Amino acid sequence: MRHAGIDIGSRSIELVVIEDGEVVVSRQSESGYNPVERVQELIADISFDKVMVTGYGRASLEIAFDYPTITEIKAYGTGAATLHPGIRGILDIGGQDTKVISLNENGKVFKFEMNDKCAAGTGKFLELMAVSLGYQQNTLGLEALKGQEGIEINSMCAVFAESEVTSLLAKGCLRADIALAVHQSVCRRAVGMIKRQGLKTPILFAGGVANNACMIHLLKQTFGDDLIIPTSPQFVGAYGAAVLAGFL
Amino acid sequence: MADYTKMWTDLGLNLDNHDALLENLGGAYQSIFMSQEHRPEGMGYFDFVMSEAHGLRIQELRDEQEAGRKIIGSFCVFVPEELVLAAGCTSVGLCAGADFAQEEVEKVLPRNTCSLIKSFFGFKLGKVCPYMEVSDLIVGENTCDGKKKSFEIFSQMVPNFFQMDLPQNKAPMARKLLKHEYEAFIAKLEEMTGKRIGLEDLKQGIATVNAKRNALARLSKLRTANPSPISGLDALLINQIAFLDNPVRFTGKVNALCDELELFVKENKGAKVENAPRVVISGCPMAIPNWKVPAVIEATGAVIVGEESCIGERGQRNTTDASADTIDGLIDAVVDRYFKIDCAVFTPNQERVEHIKEMAKNTNADGVIHYGLQFCQPYIMESFSVEKTLEKDGVSVLRLETDYSQEDMGQLSTRVEAFVEIIK
């Protein structure tokens, strides 16, 4: 039996197909303006017996293909617990939201928190900061690691932070230092959410921002080895959805 | 609906704005309420009241006015309907549950004001609320800072305004303050009508409101059944209509609906499937047409089995003891009844948390969703201790903070769906 999981996020779409517990397909694409079409392209040449869709765009697939759906909270919970048994917490920083999820000893979700309706402190925020600082999105973290501590970015709002960054640049601050400060502010916010929920460890760091070297470095300063980075942080949700498809 | 254009014009409504509001409202009502399955026939009356909320009901109020009754508009469950009825007046609720004329509102109020306050300002400035316009007196009360300060501005926009002070704690002095304020309110009503409230008037007022609350309590009790015989949306609607409809007729219709629901319970018929996840909503009031969060919750297949809210249990539970045989004794009984309301403006307010726990237990709820309107400090502040206390007791809690806009629907759905997945 081949089970497919599709995670339609605000920035990217992931597809995972598992067969007998092994991942046989994993693909990614940008969400773009027509995610349904993107999904059609992603699955065009593959076959599966069951499918489960998750993520922000799940409803569009439910409407288009009548695919069953599950929230990303449950998908991430299941994905994390299956990939790393014993995980008690998840930090997922994606394109437009940040989630903190508590799992019980059996790997079931029992509590979660999501950021409010704006994109403060998410992947989108980092993406906009990269633009302001003239960095490529995928090298922002590496550049930030070269920065010196000492600057503080207070604003979590992408619009206000941009003006904060602009004025720091005008003052002559080095952009690597500013980049580090941007990461520190996102990290503080995430740690705050984790502490507020009283997340147990070990914690799995998932979502696109878990590919960012500076974020990993900063979070490790707080959690050390209790923070686990999966091999493919962006695929945890799609993997969880594929596992859940097996229970349909 | 008949043509009420003349009435609306006489009331000074802005017809273009008003048409736009009614069109929106009608559309939302169709998609949220009329699409529900397994609705009891008794809901037909409440659908009718809603369809005529700006028509026939306003006509009735104007007819009452013709006959000499005064219409008293208010915003809070601390304004006793018993006293209004005893004075031979009619009480209507003015809280509003939709954004309207926001640009106009933000000229007079800070942006960071809760939706409920902005909404009744918008309804006033946009001239779309016939209840506000038909009211002979509007009563504002000192509950939260947002309301009491905004009433300073609002009172300038209406011809006849009465400010009621409210205590902030449950000490004996606070009770004295409440009694003093109720006596001042009685004096105001008597001044308007030119008649003193007699013992029998007050007894009758209390009896009418007690009957209404008993009917609503009966409805609440029926919702403890599994499956719940009525959806949370329909129950909320009834609680909302309680603030607009003629109280005696309303009571009769609620009781008739309850008779039907008793049969539903016997036949194991429910609004949702048996063993559907059961949710209690707790927190800020939801005024018409604020059906946003309940609609999201029930779209997941869960059923709402209680509202710990002013438009719900907090506002309607407890009746007034009508046994005293002096006016002062009856006023004391009214004060006692209202002094028990556990609004979040009080401190400390441990009773509220205890009440939520009790409701969750009595309704066999699987979880509690705490509903906070953005910038509503009293309820949002309390939501943290509500969450902690209930979770200690093993009750799952989801705290939501939102407003009247639709822009966070995606995130709200995700949170609510995920919560329902957890409590299932």
Image: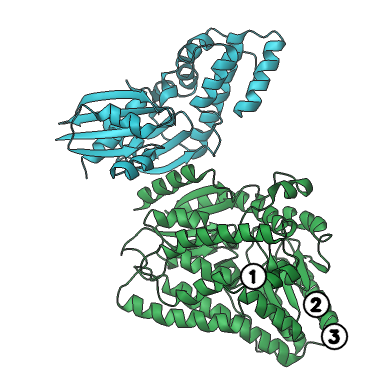
Among numbered discs 1 and 3, the one appearing first in the sequence:
3
Left or right position of A19 against A97: left
Q: Give the residue type at disc 2.
A: Glu
Whether residue B344 is visible to the viewer of this picture, yes or no, is: yes
Among numbered discs 2 and 3, the one appearing first in the sequence:
2
- Quadrant (top left/top right/bottom left/bottom right) for the N terminus of chain B: bottom right
> Do the residues under discs 1 and 3 have CB atoms within 8 angstroms?
no
Residue A232 in the image, given as x and y percentages of width and height: 33, 22
Residue A107 marker: none
Which chain does cyan denote in the image?
A
Left or right position of B227 against B324: left
Q: Give the residue type at disc 1.
A: Lys
Q: Secondary structure at mark 2?
A: helix
Viewer-side residue, B315 vs B297: B297
Viewer-side residue, A38 vs A92: A38
Circle 3 residue: B194
Which chain does green denote in the image?
B
Q: Secondary structure at mark 1?
A: loop
Q: Secondary structure at mark 3?
A: loop
Chain under numbered label 3: B
Residue A45 in the image, given as x and y percentages of width and height: 21, 26
Left or right position of B78 against A105: right
- Nearer to us of marks 1 and 3 is 3
Q: Give the residue type at disc 3.
A: Gly
Residue B183 marker: 2
Q: Give the number of marks.
A: 3
Q: Residues within 10 Å of mark 2 (few under 14, many from 20)?
A: some
Seen at 29% across and 42% down, the residue is: A65
Circle 1 residue: B340
- Nearer to us of marks 2 and 3 is 3
